Structures are given as structure tokens and as C-alpha cells.
Amino acid sequence: MRRLIPLLLAFLSSAAFAQATVTGPATGKAGAQIEVTVAGSKNPRDFVTIVEKAAREGAYGGYEYVSKPGAYKLMIPPKAGDYEIRLCAADPPYATLARRAIRVDAVEATVDAPAQVAAGAKFSVKWTGPNNERDYIAIGNAARAYFGYEYTKAGSPLSLMAPDDPGQYEVRYFLGAGDVIIGKRPIVVGSVTASVTAPSTAAAGSKIKITWQGPNNPLDFVTIVKAGAPDKTYAAYEYSSKGSPVEMRAPDAAGEYEVRYLTGQTYATLGSAKMTVTSVTASIKGPVQAVAGSTFSVNWQGPNNERDYVTIVKKGAREGDYANYEYTARGNPVKVLAPVEPGEYELRYSMGASYATLARAPITITPAKEEPGLVEVTAASAMPAGSAVEIILDASGSMLQKIGKDRRIDIARQTLTKLVTTTIPAGTPFAFRVFGRMEDSCQSDLDVPLGPLNAQAVTAKIASLEPKNGAKTAIGASLELVASDLRSVQGERLVILLTDGEETCGGDPAVAIEKLKKSGTTVRVNIVGFAIDDAKLAATFRHWADAGSGGYFDAQSAAALNEAMAKAMRPGFEIVDAQGAVVGEGLAGGEAVRVLPGSYTVRLAGRKTGQSVTVKAKEKTAVKF
């Protein structure tokens, strides 16, 4: 009897396997996408793959899980030969449940480009080839397979950017499957030079004009860095495409600096000029005490540079922290709203770029005559009709770091997959942008152009993401592209930036957000900081989100990231008094906000109209949108 049990189990197992089938074409072109049909699979984690005919049992290449019977798309390997389409069991040793022979035929391509171009210049490439999904044209050399690239789906001809370093190169046609070169031609890249002229001295944080001469290639830029900084270093910048002269803000910290003209791809310095930044001072004077929830005047003296502000924070708050604030550009004195919570506070004059404190003064907030009430806001829908969502994902090298046993990018993949499959309604106008997938590059790609959300297609894009070590964090450049990404949207535009690090491409996200707000319909920019342990950087993200009528959400773990992204989908709200001042703000569906008794208007962030409410002491007022 004991001998019969293993035989019976083996029979039942083979009978189950025999029920599974996989069908597909008998032949296919290398690198092409084919459709295979699966039936009889018993496990949603079974998968279908293509391997060489002689491959060992359990081997697999690119694959698709077969969660249900039907058709699935697979990419054919790039090398010609005899292969098999295999349906494999979910668990090791990945037994073959069904197979189908397929012959892979070789493919060829041609490229036509100029014999010589200037370093960093754009040039046109004509090509012929299979034009498979993710096939691309690139320029490379013996040391590096490719520098810049463009997908063949852009058409023929398409534009490429020459490398910054002069020398011998090739224009190459790559199959998206396996990055195999199937066509090429030689090209010579010639050298270029540049020069810059800047003021010899400038006050910290002041606006200055810089003239330059140079190639003005795409993405070339002028930047200001510490004197003696290593080559390829950059800080705030302006693209040369804005013309000469360009206007820039001097650094907030006094010292010796260099103004440099850098190439747009490798950040090589083509020209430089020395500049001394001189220190600035400020003073601030407000009342010794103020009543909780009241508005009071603060006099200030200071440089009044762009985005400088006066704020009130808890006594002993960290440098860069802020609460209620007003920009100095609004006049002198400025009006500041006192916190609702009594206690010891501090008034600060803060610089608009570095958030450095130039002056401070103590202030005591005394209790109001009546205790605060609560305003609780809910919204029936996270997005009004006609609205669109764009997610910008940081896939730079830092996303390869781990939290516990999992890489940050893997945690982000799981969170984004959950967001597009369960949180964002199917059919919602949706776009997905990614930066950080090329080494030493600030490239930003629109992986999913604006269209009705197709969760299956988007999750496939998310699953294919893989950061590159040495890739840059192009936050500013990505935000600058949002207006174009969402140009057809007539309703609200919700932008969610998920990043784990600071801007490293010299961009100015604050300026990019300001431009975005002026570019059309209502916009909200929410920022999710993943594993951010720098208080100053977190404060910077808060400022950027504030400028975008959005919020900043911090996440230090996988669970926190899920929660933060879900919160980022919720609309924010503002509580406005009779004089039009915002006295409180929060998140619909989140915690109730404390305000003093009185009459207010509650409106969703970015809206001009809202609901009138009367708040009573110690009572909760519910507002539904």
C-alpha cells in the first residue's frame, strides 16, 4: 500500500500537468513581441517564458505570470535559433507544464547619420529596422555601449545628442530585447569651448546677471559653485537656452565662488569666472506676546531677496523648520498668524533658498478667550471629474539602497502597483514619468503618456523599472515637463513626486512649480519623501509642496510609504477667515484641524470657492465635499 501512494500522487500530478497547454507562433523575429495563449494552469503564479530548446528544465528568461487563462505577450530573445515557449510551474524547480517549439529568425537594421558633429550638438538619424517595443538608437564607443538614446517609436528620422567628449563613436541600432546591436555606422565628435562673465562681487541671495558665449547645446547650463569645487559639480543653474545674459540668484552663504558654463550631458566645465559673495544681515521686531489665533504685525530689516520670509516656530525648533509664515516681498511690516496652541515661540527672518535664519526674536503666545473648535473635512471623491493624475518616480541610484531586506525600488514598485490597481479608479486620466535610469544622466522619461488609466499596462511598466548606480535626481527638470505632459487636461492636475533624495541636476523645483501653477488649470503638487533623514531636505520638500498647493508626506518604511501615497491622493483643504487669510489647513479624510471659534470658509486646496461654516468652542464641525 505504501508503494502505491507515491505512484498515485505521481499519476495525479502528471494528469494535472497534462491539462495545461500553451500555444503560439511557430516562428518569430528576434526581439519582436508575440502573443501566446495559455490554458489549464492551476496556479496564478505559474508563468510563461521563452528559452533555448536545449535549455535545462526550470530555466527561464523574460516571463509573464498567468493569473488566468488567455493571451499573454512575450518578447522573443534577440539571438536567432531554435527555442521553446514553456509554461512553468510556480514553485522551484519550475517544472514545465506545457511547451511549444518556436524558430527565431535574425533581423537587421541600418542607420544613417552625419560623418561629423560638434560635441553636445543635436543631430538627425535616419534608420530602418524592426521597430520593436523598446528598440532604440544610440551613440556609443568602444568603452561604453551607449550614451544618449532615443526609442525607435519616435520615428525616422529622430534626434540624438552627441557626447560631450570629442572622439570616434558609432551610431547604433539596439534591439530592446537584450540590447543587441543589429546596425551601426561611424561618427566623429568634434570639440567645443565656452566663456562666462559675472560680477566680481554680489550680496548673498541677490539677483545677478551672467553673460556667456558657448555652443548652447541642449541642456547646457550656467551654475554657481564654491571656488575650487571638483569638475562636474553644480548647484542652482539656468539653461543657456534662456539666452545671454541669464539672471541667477547668488548663493545664500558668503564666500568665494565660481560661475561655470557646463555641458548638458556630462557637466564638463567649458568656461568659468570668479565671484565673491558677501554676507547679509537682518533684524526682526514683533510683539512680546500675542493671543493664540490672532494676526499680528512684524517689522523686519533685511535683504528682501526672492522668497525670503518671516515665520513663527516653537522655541528651539530646528534650523529650517517653519510654521505660519509670510514672504517679506509682501511688505514691511508683514502680517503673521499666531498658532492656536499657547506657549513659547520664536519669530525668524529666513532666507528663501537655504532657509538659514538671519534674525530671531522671542514671542509668547497666550491663550485665547475661548478654546478652539475642530473642523473635520471629508470628500466623496479624491479627484473631481475631468481631473488627471501624474506620478513622478525617482529611480536614481539611491533607490537601490535597502530598508531591512528590501531595496527601496522594490518597495516603491509594490506601493505604486497597489496605488494604480486599487486606489486610483480605472479610466482616470493618468501619466507616469520616471527619472534616474541612466548612469551619470539627468534624463527624465514619460513612460506612460496621458491617457485613461490601464492598470495592467502601468503595472507592467512599474515592474520593468530598474535604477542605475550613478544616475542623477532630476526633480526640477521633471517638474518642468509636467505642463507639457498634462497640457490637454481641463480639470485639476494632481502631481505626486516620490523621491528619496535631493535635487542633483542643478534644477530649481520651486521655480518649476511656480511656472506649473501659471501654466493652466488648477494644480496640486504633493511630495512623498522616502527614507529622508535630513531635516533641512524635508523642510525644502515642504516648501516646494506648499508652493504647489499640496503637502509633504514622510515615509520611513514600506508600510509608511503605502500610507503616504494614499494620503497624497486625498485633496487638501484650507480654512479661510473673513479677511481671506488661511488660518488652518489639512487633508480631507485626515485629522481634524483646530481653529478658534468664528465664521470661516472651508475650501479644497487650489479652489477659489468653498463652504461657509461656523466653528464653536470645543465642538467639531463636519464639512463634506
Image (tube, helix red, strand yellow):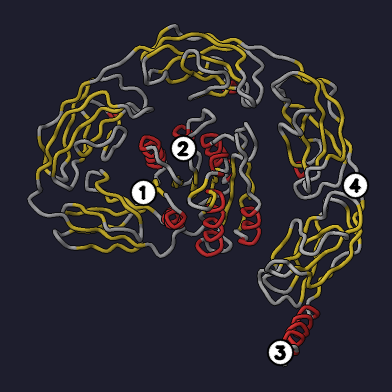
Residue, far left: 369
Q: Image quarter for residue 303?
A: top left
Q: Image quarter for residue 35?
A: bottom right
Q: Is the residue under label 2 in contact with that under label 1 (CB below 8 Å)?
A: no
Amino acid type, mark 1: Lys
Mark pair 3, 1: CA separation:
79 Å
Label 3 or label 1, whichever comes before in sequence order: 3
Q: Is mark 3 on a helix, strand or loop?
A: loop
Residue 216 rendering spot, x and y as whole percentages? 64, 19
Amino acid type, mark 3: Arg
Residue matched to label 2: 513
Q: Is residue 289 left or right of residue 561?
A: left
Residue matched to label 3: 2
The residue lying toward the viewer, choosing from 79 and 128, is 79
Q: In this view, does 376 lie to the left or right of 93?
A: left
Q: In this view, does 486 lie to the left or right of 6?
A: left
> Within 10 angstroms of label 2, few (less than 14), some, or many (20 or more) residues?
many
> Within 10 angstroms of label 1, few (less than 14), some, or many (20 or more) residues?
few
Amino acid type, mark 4: Val
Label annotation for residue 608: 1
